[in-house]
Image: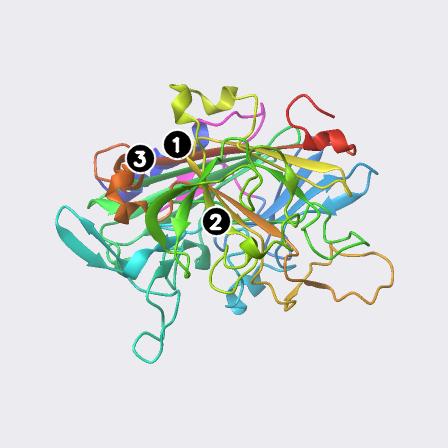
Amino acid sequence: MRVSTLGFALWALAVLARPQTPGQTLTGTVGNDTIAGSSSGPDKNGKYEISGIGIRADFIAYGASISNLFLNDSAGVERDVVGGFDNASYYSVDRQHPHFGGVPGRYANRIKNSSFVIDGTTYNILPNDNPLPPDHPEGVDTLHGGPNGWDWRNWTVVAHTSNSITFSITDQDGDQGFPGEVVSYVTYTLGNMTWDIRMVALATTKVTPIMLSSHTYWNLDGFANNNTATALNHSLWLPYSGERVGVDSILIPTGDILSNQPGSVNDFWSTPKQIGANFSNPDLLGNCGENCTGYDNCYVNNLRHEGTYDWREQEVPVARLRSAWSGIQLDVFTDQDAFQVYSCGGQNGSMALKNTQGLSDVSDRPRTIQQYGCVVLEVQDYIDGINQPQWGRGKKQIFEPGGDPYVLQASYRFSLNDTMMGLLGPGSG
């Protein structure tokens, strides 16, 4: 099968499976195949806008990234609640950007020793994490697909409507050391205060690992809270996450699945709590790596024990993030079995806020993202599952030509809740 034909089939799977608004036109190109219609193209800042009811967003081709997401807070003030840059061109210029809003791939999160084994063959991929000079200056592990992972590359816009956009990428055999070609499509759709994500990827030539995610940096105050520059005031609830993946001091899985005991620093399941609630607890030191205080942890979504379930029918989200200051609440629903939470401990005040963010009055506060000024929520599968066969993640992470595609689906549902009842779970507010 020609790649262009395969690309068109995947594009159809990714685009046509989503709801369409009457009168919308699908636009774009896949390889040499042209889809009927004409795209309005990006704006002067290189961004593609889509909108829904009570929500609008901007996306860029670099990394298939979200760069702006606008919602009104409980006072009716519009807030841009995700990290990013004002102009799309800056994403490739600033090589220090921390995967702002992009799709890490072909394998999200960390791969131990930058290697894995498939069908008895060991594959060594490019390292880019945990440098160990002088012998390993580039690193001893691989993070988010390597030094030139998918969120460092320009994708192709193959469809753009008033409420949806689809990006595509073809990852060649051997790129970053991964075996086989992979063709992937990512569709973002806005609805009634909702942001829906659908990621599809297909191994076309060889058996290969695939695991994707959305690496969005959230601050539901739009970085405009006059009381704090951090997101530690946000409450987080992970009602199904009584367990987490155990990691060593450099955040590489040990193979253990650990219990999040009620009342412990990693307990976000028994009751919602502020992200900063335990920052004075000595147990939090080292929780996100050696000498790191905070969170960079993979929590397990224990939904499977309930038997067959449809994630779209779940009444309770896998995660709820909420700010009492803005009143904005985010509920995350997904078909993925794990959930990475990063409390932005690596931010050092060097990343500038966008013009659409920050305090509107004259302030001495720097217009930058401060340490703990955001939180990253990543729907995904178990990190480094390809090196942990005892977890049984093979069917979720290893894909072959002619087999089932990799699919990730998630729905981010927003609401306004300016009462403390928002901390209490479903049915509140």
Label number found at residue 297: 2
From which residue to which does the magenta span run?
17-39
Please report contact status of discs 3 and 1: CB closer than 8 Å, yes or no.
no
Q: Is residue 19 above or below residue 323?
A: above
Q: Amino acid at mark 2?
A: Asn
Q: Amino acid at mark 3?
A: Pro
SS category of the residue bearing label 2: strand
Task: State left or right for residue 271 relative to residue 54.
Answer: left
Q: Residue 219 lies in magenta, yes or no?
A: no
Q: For residue 102, say whether it is visible.
A: no
The chief SS type of the magenta part is loop
In the rendered image, which quarter is residue 322 located in?
top right
x%, y% of residue 298? 45, 45
Q: Assign the N terminus to one quadrant of the image.
A: top left
x%, y% of residue 7? 33, 40
Label number found at residue 12: 1
Q: Which residue is mark 3?
A: 405
Q: Earlier in the sequence, mark 3 or mark 1?
A: 1
